[in-house]
Image: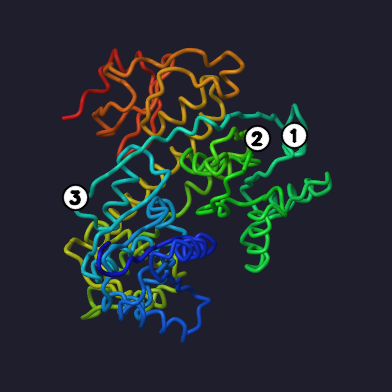
């Protein structure tokens, strides 16, 4: 309905191809994808069609707009809408894994800032993730629309294993038995490639039509596995968490987690691939205390070097013009990911600026480079600390004896007054206690402020504990009597 093309930024290859195919089926306009496997001639033909107004939809990976020719082609075309799919990846992946997400804002500006639509099913209700999306994409007075999170047809459960008590293979044996017993199509998520291969082999040995899926496999093999699963020729996919984004298979009856997810956000997205037809489905987390150790480790990594940061500022200031980020990378002899991470962190507060063409120039701040490097490290530590608190919250989900659905929904800012009666804790009778009313001073969703941690929002409370998500300090569990006696929390404003 709007003149001009739509640019879609989508994170993974399989969802991008599915999107292009689906757009073709709906026959609402020509659609094409450009990625690293597309030939130069096909690439040029696609951008020529875009410039001529013949292409209604162009689907790109977040890395593609980082290429000079792509930026030029987009700026020369009439793009009326930019859609960022899986927009929480701006926060989740942008700082470390795929830093090109953090450059999308400058690409949008280079196109004359058309309307931007950012879509996500997992951004928590509190400010940090959403603020990151708004800030990085340079959104202007955005309308933020939040719909209900509940998937009541999914039964939630956790099976807990203690290695010294249950034996080293007890968890795997229990998962295999559960998969064999279901007889339905499903997904098993693992944290590592080794676990994927081990679990897939164990299932095949029991006669289950199972196949592995992870980044260590050839692209062609992954695509064949995914197609077989979608067509019903493979009953169970055993995969790392990269599998499933954008995959719409209606009859997935279960999602089992052999390893714990890195956050409640990730877990809820992953189990949401079950029961999309509205029929009953199950989500079981097979939990073991040691599983969280690598998650906590990775949440705490990614620090920046003070001397490298200060040198980046010096090099940019004394170059006498825009300096390619690739030249900075060569000068410091660091990886591209590390270099872009430093530039992005310094750009956050004006220590330097970068353009869509991959060049950097001095920012608005003229402070001493050492002071700016110190501030960048403080911001990085804050981001890492927030990630660690998110990891801790998934452990609370695994350990709670109260209603698991109440816990999940409160994490996303949604109030469920009564236990769901469709989770293992409800079935066991430990969860059949209503959560406190939603009209008190510390009601779920109520904004509060703390004298040290600043502003936050109440996401959960039970018995004598209250959980608050602070903008600056992440998730904090506090003793409710102490909060009340010492007046530690007050209303915002």
- Residue shown at 41% from the left, 77% from the top: 330
252 lies left or right of 64: right
Image x and y of residue 361, in percent: 24, 72
Say above or below: 339 vs 404: below
For the residue pair 168 and 139, the one nearer the viewer reads as 139
Mark 1 touching mark 2, by CB under 8 A? yes
Q: What residue would you read off at disc 2?
A: 286
The kind of secondary structure element at disc 2 is strand
Label 1, label 2: how far apart the Cα atoms are: 8 Å
Q: Is residue 81 above or below residue 412?
A: below
| Residue at the disc numbered 1 | 174
Q: Position of residue 473 (x, y in %)?
A: 34, 37
Q: Quadrant of residue 170?
A: top right
In the rendered image of this protein, does residue 192 appear above or below residue 392?
Answer: below
Tell me the residue that label 3 is attached to: 141
Q: Is residue 384 visible?
A: yes
Q: Nearer the viewer, residue 331 or 356?
A: 356
Per the model, the C-alpha gap separating discs 3 and 2 is 43 Å
Q: Is residue 344 left or right of residue 175?
A: left
Q: Nearer the viewer, mark 3 or mark 1?
A: 3
* Residue neighbourhood size for the residue with mark 2, other residues' Cα within 10 Å, grouped as few (<14), some (14–19), many (≥20): many
**Is 245 placed left or right of 139 in the picture?**
right
Choose mark 3 or mark 2, whichever is in front. 3
- In this rendering, the count of numbered labels is 3
């Amino acid at each position: 309905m709007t003149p001009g093309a739509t640019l879609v930024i989508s994170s993974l290859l399989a969802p991008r191809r599915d999107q292009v195919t689906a757009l073709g089926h709906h026959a609402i306009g020509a659609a094409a994808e450009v990625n690293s496997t597309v030939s130069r001639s096909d690439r040029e033909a696609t951008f020529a069609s875009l410039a001529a107004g013949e292409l209604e939809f162009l689907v790109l990976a977040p890395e593609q707009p980082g290429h000079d020719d792509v930026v030029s082609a987009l700026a020369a075309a009439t793009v009326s809408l930019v859609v960022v799919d899986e927009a929480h990846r701006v926060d989740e992946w942008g700082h470390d894994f795929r830093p090109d997400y953090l450059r999308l804002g400058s690409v949008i500006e280079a196109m004359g800032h058309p309307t931007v639509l950012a879509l996500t099913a997992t951004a928590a209700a509190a400010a940090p993730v959403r603020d990151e999306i708004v800030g990085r994409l340079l959104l202007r007075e955005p309308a933020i629309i939040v719909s209900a999170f509940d998937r009541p047809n999914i039964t939630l459960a956790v099976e807990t294993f203690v290695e010294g008590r249950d034996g080293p293979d007890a968890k795997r044996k229990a998962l295999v038995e559960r998969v064999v017993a279901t007889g339905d199509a499903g997904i098993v998520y693992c944290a590592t490639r080794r676990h994927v291969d081990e679990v897939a082999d164990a299932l095949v040995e029991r006669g289950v039509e199972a196949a592995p899926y992870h980044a260590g496999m050839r692209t062609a093999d992954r695509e064949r596995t995914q197609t077989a699963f979608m067509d019903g020729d493979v009953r169970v996919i055993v995969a790392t968490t990269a599998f499933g984004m954008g995959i719409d298979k209606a009859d997935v009856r279960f999602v089992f987690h052999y390893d714990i997810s890195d956050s409640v956000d990730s877990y809820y997205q992953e189990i949401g691939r079950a029961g999309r037809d509205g029929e009953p489905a199950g989500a079981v987390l097979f939990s073991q205390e040691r599983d969280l150790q690598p998650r906590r480790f990775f949440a705490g990594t990614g620090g920046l070097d003070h001397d490298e940061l200060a040198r980046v500022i010096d090099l940019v200031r004394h170059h006498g013009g825009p300096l390619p980020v690739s030249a900075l990378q060569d000068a410091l002899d660091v990886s591209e990911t590390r270099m872009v991470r430093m530039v992005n962190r310094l750009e956050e507060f004006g220590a330097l600026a970068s353009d869509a063409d991959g060049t950097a120039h001095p920012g608005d701040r003229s402070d001493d480079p050492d002071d700016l490097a110190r501030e960048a490290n403080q911001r990085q530590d804050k981001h890492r600390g927030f990630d660690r608190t998110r990891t801790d919250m998934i452990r609370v989900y695994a350990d709670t004896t109260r209603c698991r659905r109440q816990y999940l929904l409160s994490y996303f800012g949604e109030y469920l007054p009564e236990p769901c009666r469709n989770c293992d804790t409800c079935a066991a009778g430990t969860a059949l206690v209503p959560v406190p009313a939603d009209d008190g001073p510390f009601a779920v969703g109520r904004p509060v402020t703390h004298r040290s941690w600043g502003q936050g929002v109440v996401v959960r409370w039970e018995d004598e504990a209250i959980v608050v998500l602070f903008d600056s300090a992440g998730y904090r569990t506090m003793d409710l009597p102490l909060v009340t006696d010492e007046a530690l929390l007050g209303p915002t404003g």
